[in-house]
Amino acid sequence: MKLIIAVVQDKDSNRLTDALGSENFQTTKLATTGGFLKEGNTTLMIGCGDDYVDDALSIIRDNCSQREQMVAPISPMGGNADSYIPKPVKVELGGATVFILPIESFYQF
Ligand code: 2BA
């Protein structure tokens, strides 16, 4: 058994959980925050048999989109805030960041 942990954009999360559910994958959805952008994203925990990992990955791939986002950098520490004109930086948000962990034991009581 494996635990798939997928960090996805909020905009994709409902479509993705619906698509996974329609293929009988069970999911747990966590409201998370990205460390870099400090914005909300969604982390899904998906427990499944080893033979189903590829199917889950292709559903994730098909339902998560890459997007670009402009981010305003924070003004430099100690700098003169009056003369600092923040230039937005373009950040490429991935479709999904996926970790796959082996599961030693699985119980449901
Ligand atoms: P955030 O940490 O908010 O990062 C959002 C996007 O900002 C990233 O998209 C990446 O394009 C960019 N980014 C992140 N750190 C950067 C840096 N030091 N300099 C320049 N740009 C940077 P993704 O790579 O698609 O990541 C989307 C979200 O997935 C992340 O949100 C984070 O919540 C999670 N994530 C990505 N890699 C991770 C990792 N190795 N471990 C844990 N969580 C991860």
Image (cartoon, rainbow, N blue to C red):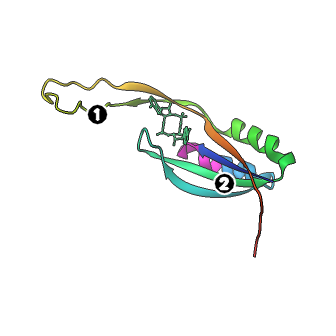
Given the image, on which type of amino acid does mark 2 rest?
Met
**Residue 78, percent across and down?**
16, 32
Q: CA distance from mark 1 to mark 2?
A: 33 Å
Seen in the picture, residue 79 relative to 97 is either above or below; the reply is: above
Q: Secondary structure at mark 2?
A: strand
Q: Is residue 29 left or right of residue 26?
A: left
- In this rendering, the count of numbered labels is 2
Whether 53 is among the magenta residues is no
Say whether residue 28 is left or right of residue 88: right
| Crowd tier of the residue under label 2, counting other residues whose Cα lies within 10 Å: few below 14, some 14–19, many 20 or above | some
Check the picture and name the quadrant holding the C terminus. Answer: bottom right
Of 66 and 35, nearer the camera is: 35
At horizontal 71% and vertical 36% (from top left) the residue drawn is 62
Q: Main secondary structure of the magenta part?
A: helix
| Amino acid type indicated by mark 1 | Ile
The numbered disc on residue 92 is none
* Magenta stretch in the rendered image: 8-15
Residue 27 in percent (x, y) is at: 69, 57
Q: Position of residue 84 (x, y in %)?
A: 19, 25
Magenta stretch: includes residue 10:
yes
Q: Which residue is mark 2?
A: 45
Q: Is residue 37 left or right of residue 100?
A: left
Residue 54 image position (x, y, % from top left) = 81, 40
Secondary element at tag 1: loop
Residue hosting label 1: 74
